[in-house]
Image (cartoon, helix red, strand yellow):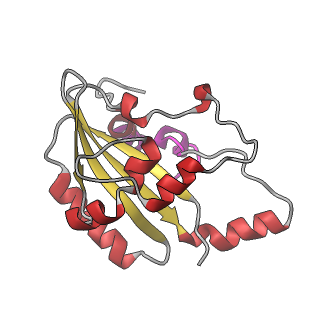
Amino acid sequence: MPTGPVQLIVLGFARAGFQAEINAELGRLRHACREAIDVLDALAVFKDPGGGLEVEHLGVLTRDEAIETGSRIADLVGLDIDGEQPSADARAAGEAELDGAEILAEDAWDVLDEIPPGSAAALLLLEHQWAIPLRDAISRTGGRHVSDGFVSPLDLIAIGLHTAEEAERLYRWETGDARRTR
C-alpha cells in the first residue's frame, strides 16, 4: 500500500494537562477519518525550566506497542525514550546511504529546540492518505513539490473564510500572542 505525504505538527502548550482531551480527539480522528488521515504517532513532550525532557505517548500507541515498535516521531527527531529502541526501519535507514543526497545542517529542523523551557508540546505525525492520488497525478504530469504551509487566519479575511474577530482570535491562538490587535 502506498504511503501518503507525511506531516509532523508541533503544538505548544504552557504546561502539561492537555493529554486527555488531545487523546480523545486523536482517537476520534484515527477511527472516523482513517481513510483520509492516519495518525501514525503522537507524543507529549515536557521541557523543564533547565531544558530536560520528559516524554509520554499520546493515545495512538500503547506503551507496550511503543516499546515493541519504537516511536516513529522519536526515530524521526532523534529522541531517546527510556526503555525503547529505535525501530528496525529506523536502524536500517541509519545504516543506509542516501545515494549522494546531502542533508545540510542549516536545513535541519530541530523540533525539540523549538519547545520553550518550562512548557509542553504535542508532536503529531500524520499521513495524508487522501493526497496519494493527487500526488501521483502531479508526478505523472511532471509536477513537483515547491512549498507548503498553513495560511494565517488573518489572510483568510480577504477571501471571506473568516470574520475579522474570528481571524483575530485564531491568530492569537496560533501564535500565542494575546496582545496582538489588528
Q: From the viewer's perspective, is residue 77 above or below residue 38?
A: above
Q: In which quarter of the image is the N terminus?
A: bottom right
Q: Is residue 109 shown left or right of residue 49?
A: right
Q: Does the magenta stretch include residue 119?
A: no
Q: Is residue 151 shown left or right of residue 110?
A: right
Query: In the rendered image, is residue 68 in sight?
Result: yes
Give the quadrant of residue 137: bottom right
Q: Does the magenta stretch include residue 159?
A: yes
- Tell me which residue sits at (35%, 72%) in the image: 30
- Tell me which residue sits at (46%, 33%) in the image: 110
Residue 92 position within the rendered picture, expressed as x and y whole percent measured from the top left: 54, 56
Count how many numbered circles sit on residues in the image: 0
Q: From the viewer's perspective, is residue 137 above or below residue 73?
A: below
Identify which residue, 104 or 119, lies in the foreground: 104
- Tell me which residue sits at (30%, 23%) in the image: 179
Give the quadrant of residue 115: top left
Residue 43 position within the rendered picture, expressed as x and y whole percent measured from the top left: 30, 51
Q: Is residue 57 shown left or right of residue 141?
A: left
Q: From the viewer's perspective, is residue 151 above or below residue 6?
A: above
Q: Give the range drawn in magenta.
A: 150-170
